[in-house]
Image (cartoon, rainbow, N blue to C red):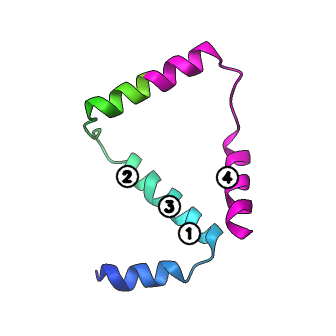
Amino acid sequence: MNLSNTLDEIKGLDVEERIRLVEAIWDSIASEPGRPELTDAQRQELERRLAAHEASPEDVVPWEEVKADAIARIRK
């Protein structure tokens, strides 16, 4: 695979198509067996976020809303 050509093709996609592509790539990585090793900093950040969520579980934004906001910002 020629990464440069692939990236050029990806740049030709509209924003929504690129987001769907990123989601599909992430899903394919997540479905692989095993887990990637986390650094200490990553583990600490995950623990901090989990603690914040447990302290205020109602303080969330649905993914659909986050995604729609991101797409709207890109289109401005």
Residue drawn at 42 percent across, 22 percent down: 47
Q: Secondary structure at mark 3?
A: helix
What segment carries the magenta color? Answer: 48-76
Which numbered dot is residue 67? 4
Q: CA distance from mark 4 to mark 3?
A: 12 Å
- Mark 1 or 2, closer to the camera: 1
Name which residue type carries label 1. Arg
Looking at the rendered structure, the kind of residue marked 2 is Ile
The mark that comes first in sequence, 2 or 4, is 2
Q: Which residue is mark 2?
A: 29
Question: Compared with residue 50, is residue 39 higher up or lower down, i.e. above or below?
Answer: below
**In magenta stretch: residue 54:** yes
The numbered disc on residue 18 is 1
Reading the image, the residue beneath label 3 is: 22
Q: Is disc 4 placed on a helix, strand or loop?
A: helix
Q: Are marks 3 and 1 in contact (CB under 8 Å)?
A: yes
